[in-house]
Image (tube, rainbow, N blue to C red):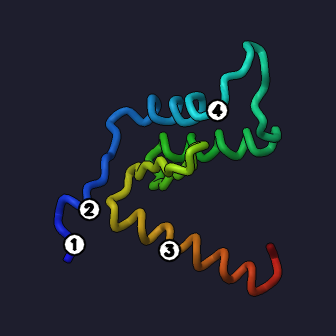
Amino acid sequence: MVQPEDNIVEIPGDLDAVLKRILNGSRPAVAKGDRSILAAEDEAYLASLVDAVRTGRRAVLIVEDVDERLRYMFSNASPAEAVAMLGKVTEATGRRIAEHDI
């Protein structure tokens, strides 16, 4: 039986601070002036996702740290909505694999 305390999800109050910590804090230390390891189109896509979250779109953000620990955040969504969103991603990815689009 699942106990209520097993279902605790932290929802940060300051989204900007969390995103900055994720984007800056989990990368290896780089010398000043070094660039991101992301391609320019990936940087643009990430920026568009952050903009969408800032305007109120629901989001699930998952980052795997170097020690294989997962850090995640639900934004503008309840835990149930976040799980439903993950299900949609899994379903869409399965369809694309079946259709050989991936």
Vertical relation: 75 (above or below) 35 = below
- Density class for disc 2 (Cα within 10 Å; few <14, some 14-19, many ≥20) is few
- Amino acid at circle 1: Val
Q: Is residue 55 left or right of residue 45?
A: left
Residue indicated by mark 4: 27
Residue at x 19%, y 59% (from the top left corner): 5
Determine whether label 2 and label 1 are within 8 Å by CB.
yes
- Density class for disc 1 (Cα within 10 Å; few <14, some 14-19, many ≥20) is few
Q: Position of residue 49 (x, y in %)?
A: 60, 47
- Density class for disc 4 (Cα within 10 Å; few <14, some 14-19, many ≥20) is few
Residue at x 68%, y 83% (from the top left corner): 95
Residue indicated by mark 3: 87
Vertical relation: 26 (above or below) 63 = above
Residue at x 54%, y 36% (from the top left corner): 22
Q: Position of residue 11 (x, y in %)?
A: 33, 46
Determine whether label 1 and label 3 are within 8 Å by CB.
no
Vertical relation: 5 (above or below) 40 = below
Residue indicated by mark 2: 7
- Amino acid at circle 3: Gly
Determine whether label 2 and label 4 are within 8 Å by CB.
no
In front: mark 4 or mark 3?
4
- Density class for disc 3 (Cα within 10 Å; few <14, some 14-19, many ≥20) is few
Per the model, the C-alpha gap separating discs 2 and 1 is 8 Å
Q: Earlier in the sequence, mark 2 or mark 4?
A: 2
Determine whether label 3 and label 2 are within 8 Å by CB.
no
Q: Is residue 70 left or right of residue 31?
A: left
Per the model, the C-alpha gap separating discs 1 and 3 is 21 Å
Per the model, the C-alpha gap separating discs 1 and 4 is 35 Å
